[in-house]
Image (tube, helix red, strand yellow):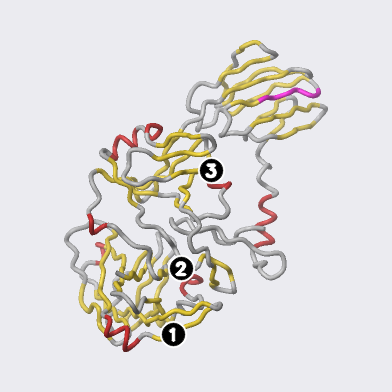
Amino acid sequence: MTTYFQPMAGGYFKVFSRPYDKFWCCTGSGMESFTKLGDSAVYACGSDFYLEQYLSLYAEHGGIAFSLSCDFPMSEEAEIRAEKGTFCLHLRIPDWAAGEIRLNKNGTACTADVVRGHLVLLLSAGDALRLRIPVGVRLSSLPDSPDTYAFVYGGKVLSADLGTEDMRETTTGVEVSIPARRILASERIYFADARDVAMHPERYLVREGDGFRLTGGDVDYSFGLHYRRWRERYAIYFCFCSGVREAEEERRAPVDVVQPGYGQYEADAWHELREENTVSVTSDGTCRYCRPGGSFSYDLRVDETKRNVLSLRLLHADNGRRLRVTAGDEVLFDGRLNDTMHEGLYRRTFPVFAETIARCARKKCVGGEEASVIRVCFEGAQEEESARVSEFIEMFAE
Protein backbone atom coordinates (compact mmCIF):
# COMPACT_ATOMS: atom_id res chain seq x y z
CA MET A 1 0.00 0.00 0.00
CA THR A 2 1.13 3.59 -0.64
CA THR A 3 0.99 6.94 1.12
CA TYR A 4 -0.74 9.94 -0.45
CA PHE A 5 0.17 12.80 1.88
CA GLN A 6 3.16 12.24 4.14
CA PRO A 7 3.20 14.86 6.92
CA MET A 8 6.56 16.52 7.48
CA ALA A 9 5.54 18.25 10.70
CA GLY A 10 6.45 16.32 13.83
CA GLY A 11 3.88 14.30 15.74
CA TYR A 12 2.03 12.73 12.84
CA PHE A 13 2.25 9.28 11.25
CA LYS A 14 2.09 7.80 7.75
CA VAL A 15 -1.34 6.75 6.50
CA PHE A 16 -1.58 4.17 3.74
CA SER A 17 -4.14 3.27 1.10
CA ARG A 18 -6.24 0.11 1.31
CA PRO A 19 -6.79 -2.47 -1.46
CA TYR A 20 -10.44 -1.74 -2.26
CA ASP A 21 -11.88 1.35 -0.58
CA LYS A 22 -8.96 3.79 -0.21
CA PHE A 23 -7.28 4.20 -3.60
CA TRP A 24 -6.83 7.90 -4.32
CA CYS A 25 -6.50 9.83 -7.54
CA CYS A 26 -2.70 10.15 -7.35
CA THR A 27 -2.06 6.54 -6.30
CA GLY A 28 -1.63 5.46 -9.93
CA SER A 29 1.01 8.06 -10.76
CA GLY A 30 2.58 7.42 -7.36
CA MET A 31 2.98 3.72 -8.15
CA GLU A 32 4.50 4.61 -11.51
CA SER A 33 7.05 6.86 -9.82
CA PHE A 34 8.41 4.01 -7.70
CA THR A 35 9.47 2.21 -10.89
CA LYS A 36 11.77 5.16 -11.62
CA LEU A 37 13.86 4.92 -8.45
CA GLY A 38 16.57 2.96 -10.21
CA ASP A 39 16.58 4.81 -13.52
CA SER A 40 19.67 6.83 -12.57
CA ALA A 41 21.60 4.11 -10.75
CA VAL A 42 23.90 3.11 -13.61
CA TYR A 43 24.86 4.79 -16.90
CA ALA A 44 26.76 3.16 -19.77
CA CYS A 45 28.86 4.80 -22.45
CA GLY A 46 30.61 2.18 -24.57
CA SER A 47 32.76 0.17 -22.16
CA ASP A 48 32.55 2.86 -19.47
CA PHE A 49 29.99 2.28 -16.71
CA TYR A 50 29.05 4.96 -14.18
CA LEU A 51 27.68 3.76 -10.83
CA GLU A 52 25.69 6.67 -9.39
CA GLN A 53 23.56 5.04 -6.67
CA TYR A 54 24.74 2.48 -4.14
CA LEU A 55 21.91 -0.03 -4.34
CA SER A 56 22.01 -3.81 -4.60
CA LEU A 57 21.62 -4.33 -8.34
CA TYR A 58 22.62 -6.24 -11.45
CA ALA A 59 23.61 -4.26 -14.56
CA GLU A 60 24.06 -5.69 -18.05
CA HIS A 61 24.63 -3.86 -21.32
CA GLY A 62 26.61 -4.44 -24.51
CA GLY A 63 28.14 -7.74 -23.44
CA ILE A 64 29.25 -6.33 -20.08
CA ALA A 65 27.65 -7.21 -16.73
CA PHE A 66 28.37 -6.66 -13.06
CA SER A 67 26.52 -6.97 -9.75
CA LEU A 68 26.59 -4.82 -6.63
CA SER A 69 25.67 -6.09 -3.15
CA CYS A 70 25.34 -3.54 -0.37
CA ASP A 71 23.18 -2.26 2.50
CA PHE A 72 24.12 1.39 2.90
CA PRO A 73 24.00 3.12 5.28
CA MET A 74 23.62 0.41 7.93
CA SER A 75 26.69 -1.36 6.55
CA GLU A 76 29.72 0.50 5.22
CA GLU A 77 30.84 -2.45 3.08
CA ALA A 78 29.88 -3.28 -0.51
CA GLU A 79 31.02 -5.81 -3.10
CA ILE A 80 31.06 -5.49 -6.87
CA ARG A 81 31.52 -8.61 -8.99
CA ALA A 82 32.40 -8.37 -12.68
CA GLU A 83 30.29 -10.99 -14.47
CA LYS A 84 31.04 -10.40 -18.17
CA GLY A 85 33.52 -8.47 -20.28
CA THR A 86 36.19 -5.90 -19.48
CA PHE A 87 35.07 -2.39 -18.58
CA CYS A 88 36.05 0.84 -16.90
CA LEU A 89 33.99 1.42 -13.77
CA HIS A 90 33.39 4.94 -12.48
CA LEU A 91 32.27 4.94 -8.82
CA ARG A 92 30.58 8.13 -7.65
CA ILE A 93 32.12 9.65 -4.51
CA PRO A 94 28.95 10.45 -2.53
CA ASP A 95 28.66 13.66 -0.54
CA TRP A 96 27.61 11.57 2.48
CA ALA A 97 30.96 9.75 2.64
CA ALA A 98 32.41 10.49 6.09
CA GLY A 99 35.99 9.78 5.04
CA GLU A 100 38.21 8.22 2.38
CA ILE A 101 36.75 5.36 0.33
CA ARG A 102 38.93 2.23 0.59
CA LEU A 103 39.14 -0.33 -2.23
CA ASN A 104 40.21 -3.97 -2.30
CA LYS A 105 40.46 -5.80 -5.63
CA ASN A 106 40.68 -9.59 -5.58
CA GLY A 107 41.93 -9.54 -1.99
CA THR A 108 44.56 -6.80 -2.46
CA ALA A 109 44.19 -3.16 -1.43
CA CYS A 110 44.24 -0.84 -4.43
CA THR A 111 43.83 2.79 -5.39
CA ALA A 112 41.94 4.51 -8.18
CA ASP A 113 42.16 7.76 -10.11
CA VAL A 114 39.66 10.48 -9.24
CA VAL A 115 37.97 11.89 -12.33
CA ARG A 116 35.10 14.38 -12.05
CA GLY A 117 33.90 13.14 -8.68
CA HIS A 118 34.33 9.43 -9.48
CA LEU A 119 36.87 6.74 -8.64
CA VAL A 120 37.90 5.07 -11.88
CA LEU A 121 39.35 1.57 -12.26
CA LEU A 122 39.41 -1.31 -14.75
CA LEU A 123 37.53 -4.56 -14.08
CA SER A 124 37.29 -7.83 -16.02
CA ALA A 125 35.00 -10.86 -15.70
CA GLY A 126 35.84 -12.71 -12.48
CA ASP A 127 37.13 -9.68 -10.60
CA ALA A 128 35.74 -8.97 -7.14
CA LEU A 129 35.97 -5.40 -5.85
CA ARG A 130 35.23 -4.68 -2.21
CA LEU A 131 34.77 -1.08 -1.13
CA ARG A 132 34.24 0.62 2.21
CA ILE A 133 32.50 3.99 2.36
CA PRO A 134 32.64 5.48 5.90
CA VAL A 135 29.21 6.58 7.13
CA GLY A 136 28.48 9.21 9.78
CA VAL A 137 25.82 11.44 11.28
CA ARG A 138 25.23 14.80 9.62
CA LEU A 139 22.69 17.60 9.95
CA SER A 140 20.51 19.13 7.26
CA SER A 141 18.96 22.49 8.12
CA LEU A 142 15.86 24.13 6.68
CA PRO A 143 16.61 26.91 4.16
CA ASP A 144 14.39 29.42 5.99
CA SER A 145 15.24 28.27 9.53
CA PRO A 146 18.97 27.61 9.91
CA ASP A 147 18.68 26.43 13.54
CA THR A 148 16.10 23.77 12.62
CA TYR A 149 17.66 20.45 11.63
CA ALA A 150 17.05 16.92 10.49
CA PHE A 151 19.59 14.21 11.30
CA VAL A 152 20.99 12.37 8.26
CA TYR A 153 22.99 9.14 8.26
CA GLY A 154 24.79 8.08 5.11
CA GLY A 155 22.44 10.04 2.88
CA LYS A 156 19.29 8.70 4.60
CA VAL A 157 17.02 10.93 6.65
CA LEU A 158 16.42 9.86 10.25
CA SER A 159 13.29 10.47 12.30
CA ALA A 160 12.48 10.21 15.99
CA ASP A 161 10.15 7.46 17.20
CA LEU A 162 7.20 9.08 19.00
CA GLY A 163 5.25 5.91 19.75
CA THR A 164 1.81 4.70 18.75
CA GLU A 165 -0.56 6.68 21.00
CA ASP A 166 -3.97 7.38 19.45
CA MET A 167 -3.40 6.27 15.85
CA ARG A 168 -6.89 7.22 14.73
CA GLU A 169 -7.40 8.45 11.18
CA THR A 170 -9.80 10.99 9.73
CA THR A 171 -10.44 12.24 6.20
CA THR A 172 -9.82 15.45 4.29
CA GLY A 173 -10.55 16.69 0.80
CA VAL A 174 -11.99 13.96 -1.41
CA GLU A 175 -12.06 11.29 1.30
CA VAL A 176 -8.28 11.21 1.68
CA SER A 177 -7.23 9.53 4.94
CA ILE A 178 -4.92 11.51 7.22
CA PRO A 179 -3.89 11.29 10.90
CA ALA A 180 -6.70 12.49 13.15
CA ARG A 181 -4.40 14.43 15.46
CA ARG A 182 -0.85 15.50 16.05
CA ILE A 183 1.01 14.49 19.21
CA LEU A 184 4.30 16.25 19.98
CA ALA A 185 5.20 18.15 23.13
CA SER A 186 7.68 20.51 21.43
CA GLU A 187 9.86 20.77 18.33
CA ARG A 188 12.57 22.36 20.49
CA ILE A 189 15.47 20.46 22.04
CA TYR A 190 17.66 22.22 24.61
CA PHE A 191 21.40 21.53 24.89
CA ALA A 192 24.14 23.12 26.96
CA ASP A 193 25.57 24.50 23.70
CA ALA A 194 23.44 24.12 20.56
CA ARG A 195 26.32 25.38 18.42
CA ASP A 196 28.43 22.40 19.44
CA VAL A 197 25.63 20.06 18.36
CA ALA A 198 25.51 21.75 14.97
CA MET A 199 29.28 21.39 14.59
CA HIS A 200 29.63 17.85 15.99
CA PRO A 201 26.29 16.03 15.60
CA GLU A 202 28.02 12.64 15.79
CA ARG A 203 28.76 13.30 19.47
CA TYR A 204 25.07 13.66 20.29
CA LEU A 205 23.34 11.08 18.06
CA VAL A 206 24.96 7.71 18.74
CA ARG A 207 24.25 4.55 16.79
CA GLU A 208 22.95 1.59 18.80
CA GLY A 209 22.45 -1.47 16.57
CA ASP A 210 19.99 -0.50 13.83
CA GLY A 211 18.87 2.59 15.72
CA PHE A 212 20.26 5.80 17.19
CA ARG A 213 20.02 7.46 20.59
CA LEU A 214 20.03 11.22 21.16
CA THR A 215 22.23 12.24 24.09
CA GLY A 216 23.10 15.53 25.77
CA GLY A 217 19.71 17.16 25.30
CA ASP A 218 16.78 17.67 27.66
CA VAL A 219 14.64 15.04 25.88
CA ASP A 220 15.25 11.35 25.25
CA TYR A 221 14.52 10.28 21.67
CA SER A 222 15.45 7.19 19.68
CA PHE A 223 15.92 7.68 15.94
CA GLY A 224 15.75 5.34 12.95
CA LEU A 225 15.79 5.41 9.16
CA HIS A 226 12.67 7.34 8.18
CA TYR A 227 11.95 5.40 5.00
CA ARG A 228 11.63 2.21 7.07
CA ARG A 229 9.13 3.79 9.45
CA TRP A 230 5.55 2.84 8.73
CA ARG A 231 3.39 2.51 11.85
CA GLU A 232 4.53 4.91 14.58
CA ARG A 233 4.37 8.66 15.00
CA TYR A 234 7.56 10.49 14.11
CA ALA A 235 9.37 13.81 14.04
CA ILE A 236 12.02 14.74 11.48
CA TYR A 237 12.85 18.41 12.14
CA PHE A 238 13.86 19.89 15.49
CA CYS A 239 14.96 23.35 16.60
CA PHE A 240 18.20 23.23 18.62
CA CYS A 241 18.37 25.71 21.50
CA SER A 242 21.01 26.53 24.11
CA GLY A 243 20.16 26.76 27.79
CA VAL A 244 17.29 25.45 29.87
CA ARG A 245 13.69 25.07 28.82
CA GLU A 246 11.42 27.52 30.62
CA ALA A 247 8.46 26.02 32.43
CA GLU A 248 5.90 27.96 30.40
CA GLU A 249 7.32 26.51 27.20
CA GLU A 250 6.26 23.00 28.15
CA ARG A 251 3.39 22.22 25.82
CA ARG A 252 0.61 19.72 25.76
CA ALA A 253 -0.66 17.89 22.76
CA PRO A 254 -3.34 20.11 21.18
CA VAL A 255 -6.98 19.15 21.33
CA ASP A 256 -7.18 20.22 17.69
CA VAL A 257 -4.96 21.69 14.99
CA VAL A 258 -5.56 23.04 11.49
CA GLN A 259 -3.11 24.40 8.93
CA PRO A 260 -4.35 27.68 7.41
CA GLY A 261 -3.77 28.00 3.69
CA TYR A 262 -3.59 24.24 3.05
CA GLY A 263 -7.04 23.92 1.51
CA GLN A 264 -7.67 20.18 1.67
CA TYR A 265 -6.71 19.99 5.33
CA GLU A 266 -8.86 23.00 6.18
CA ALA A 267 -11.97 21.73 4.39
CA ASP A 268 -12.09 18.29 6.02
CA ALA A 269 -15.18 17.09 7.84
CA TRP A 270 -13.95 18.23 11.25
CA HIS A 271 -12.88 21.77 10.41
CA GLU A 272 -15.26 22.70 7.56
CA LEU A 273 -13.46 25.80 6.29
CA ARG A 274 -15.82 28.62 5.38
CA GLU A 275 -14.16 31.50 3.61
CA GLU A 276 -15.09 34.58 1.68
CA ASN A 277 -12.63 36.75 -0.20
CA THR A 278 -9.45 35.22 1.28
CA VAL A 279 -6.03 34.18 -0.04
CA SER A 280 -4.27 30.88 0.74
CA VAL A 281 -0.48 30.66 0.45
CA THR A 282 1.60 27.48 0.24
CA SER A 283 4.67 28.75 -1.63
CA ASP A 284 6.49 30.06 1.46
CA GLY A 285 5.25 28.11 4.42
CA THR A 286 1.46 28.17 4.65
CA CYS A 287 -0.90 30.95 5.65
CA ARG A 288 -4.31 32.42 4.96
CA TYR A 289 -5.36 36.06 5.07
CA CYS A 290 -8.43 38.12 4.22
CA ARG A 291 -8.79 40.60 1.43
CA PRO A 292 -10.77 43.73 2.35
CA GLY A 293 -14.08 42.64 3.83
CA GLY A 294 -13.19 38.95 3.80
CA SER A 295 -13.27 36.30 6.53
CA PHE A 296 -12.51 32.62 7.18
CA SER A 297 -13.53 30.28 9.97
CA TYR A 298 -13.20 26.70 11.23
CA ASP A 299 -14.78 24.33 13.69
CA LEU A 300 -12.14 23.57 16.32
CA ARG A 301 -12.48 20.84 18.91
CA VAL A 302 -12.48 21.90 22.57
CA ASP A 303 -12.40 20.13 25.92
CA GLU A 304 -15.49 21.21 27.85
CA THR A 305 -13.98 20.00 31.13
CA LYS A 306 -10.90 22.27 31.01
CA ARG A 307 -9.71 25.78 30.24
CA ASN A 308 -9.05 26.09 26.50
CA VAL A 309 -6.43 28.27 24.83
CA LEU A 310 -6.29 29.23 21.14
CA SER A 311 -2.72 29.43 19.79
CA LEU A 312 -1.86 31.31 16.58
CA ARG A 313 1.36 31.88 14.66
CA LEU A 314 1.68 35.40 13.32
CA LEU A 315 4.35 37.32 11.41
CA HIS A 316 6.33 40.26 12.75
CA ALA A 317 6.26 41.65 9.19
CA ASP A 318 2.49 42.13 9.58
CA ASN A 319 2.87 44.71 12.34
CA GLY A 320 0.23 47.38 11.78
CA ARG A 321 -2.19 45.05 10.01
CA ARG A 322 -5.57 44.46 11.55
CA LEU A 323 -6.93 41.12 12.79
CA ARG A 324 -10.18 40.21 14.50
CA VAL A 325 -10.46 36.78 16.12
CA THR A 326 -13.68 35.38 17.57
CA ALA A 327 -14.62 32.07 19.17
CA GLY A 328 -18.36 31.60 19.09
CA ASP A 329 -19.74 34.99 20.14
CA GLU A 330 -16.64 36.00 22.12
CA VAL A 331 -14.10 38.44 20.68
CA LEU A 332 -10.60 37.12 21.51
CA PHE A 333 -8.68 39.89 19.73
CA ASP A 334 -9.61 42.93 17.67
CA GLY A 335 -6.85 45.33 16.77
CA ARG A 336 -3.61 45.92 14.90
CA LEU A 337 -0.57 43.72 15.45
CA ASN A 338 2.23 45.40 17.36
CA ASP A 339 4.94 42.82 18.06
CA THR A 340 8.22 44.14 19.48
CA MET A 341 9.84 40.90 20.67
CA HIS A 342 10.47 38.93 17.48
CA GLU A 343 11.82 39.18 13.95
CA GLY A 344 9.93 36.48 12.07
CA LEU A 345 7.20 34.06 13.06
CA TYR A 346 5.88 34.24 16.62
CA ARG A 347 3.11 32.75 18.74
CA ARG A 348 0.13 34.48 20.36
CA THR A 349 -2.30 32.70 22.65
CA PHE A 350 -5.84 33.64 23.65
CA PRO A 351 -7.92 32.00 26.41
CA VAL A 352 -11.40 30.80 25.44
CA PHE A 353 -13.49 31.09 28.55
CA ALA A 354 -15.56 28.20 29.91
CA GLU A 355 -18.68 30.36 29.76
CA THR A 356 -18.16 30.88 26.04
CA ILE A 357 -17.69 27.17 25.44
CA ALA A 358 -20.77 26.32 27.50
CA ARG A 359 -22.78 28.86 25.50
CA CYS A 360 -21.42 28.32 21.98
CA ALA A 361 -19.89 24.82 21.68
CA ARG A 362 -21.87 22.06 20.02
CA LYS A 363 -21.49 18.32 19.60
CA LYS A 364 -20.16 17.01 16.30
CA CYS A 365 -19.68 13.43 15.08
CA VAL A 366 -17.21 12.48 12.32
CA GLY A 367 -16.43 8.88 11.40
CA GLY A 368 -18.03 7.59 14.58
CA GLU A 369 -16.06 9.96 16.83
CA GLU A 370 -17.93 12.62 18.78
CA ALA A 371 -16.40 15.83 20.11
CA SER A 372 -17.38 19.35 21.15
CA VAL A 373 -16.47 22.07 18.65
CA ILE A 374 -16.61 25.84 18.57
CA ARG A 375 -16.52 28.09 15.50
CA VAL A 376 -13.37 30.24 15.37
CA CYS A 377 -13.43 33.11 12.87
CA PHE A 378 -10.75 35.44 11.47
CA GLU A 379 -11.43 38.82 9.84
CA GLY A 380 -9.59 41.93 8.77
CA ALA A 381 -11.17 45.26 7.94
CA GLN A 382 -13.52 46.48 5.21
CA GLU A 383 -10.87 48.66 3.59
CA GLU A 384 -7.63 46.65 3.94
CA GLU A 385 -6.11 43.17 4.00
CA SER A 386 -5.83 41.34 7.30
CA ALA A 387 -2.72 40.04 9.01
CA ARG A 388 -1.66 36.55 7.92
CA VAL A 389 -2.50 33.56 10.11
CA SER A 390 0.40 31.17 9.49
CA GLU A 391 1.57 27.56 9.84
CA PHE A 392 -0.74 26.04 12.48
CA ILE A 393 -3.80 27.09 14.47
CA GLU A 394 -4.00 25.02 17.65
CA MET A 395 -6.48 24.62 20.49
CA PHE A 396 -5.02 23.49 23.81
CA ALA A 397 -6.75 22.37 27.00
CA GLU A 398 -5.16 23.23 30.35
Counting residues from the N terminus, which is met first, the one under dot 2 or under dot 1? 2
Q: Amino acid at mark 3?
A: Leu
Front residue of 210 and 348: 210
Judge left or right: residue 66 versus residue 223. right
User: What crowding class fits label 3: few (fewer than 14 Cα within 10 Å), some (14-19), or many (20 or more)?
Assistant: some
- Marks 2 and 3: in contact by CB < 8 Å? no
Residue 334 highlighted magenta (yes or no): no
Q: Which residue is mark 3?
A: 225
Contact, CB < 8 Å: mark 3 with mark 1? no
Residue 311 coordinates in the image, percent (x, y): 31, 68
In this view, the mark in front (2 or 1): 1
Q: Quadrant of the N terminus?
A: bottom right
Closer to us: 367 or 6: 367
* Rendered location of residue 142, percent (x, y): 40, 48
> Which numbered tag is attached to residue 262?
2
| Residue lying at the far top of the rendered structure | 108
Q: Residue at x 43, y 34 (%)?
A: 206
Q: CA distance from mark 3 to mark 2?
A: 28 Å
Q: Is residue 276 above or below residue 21?
A: below
Of residues 361 and 173, the one drawn nearer to the viewer in this rendering: 361
The residue segment tinted magenta is 79-84
Label 2 element class: loop
Amino acid type of the residue tagged 2 in the rendering = Tyr
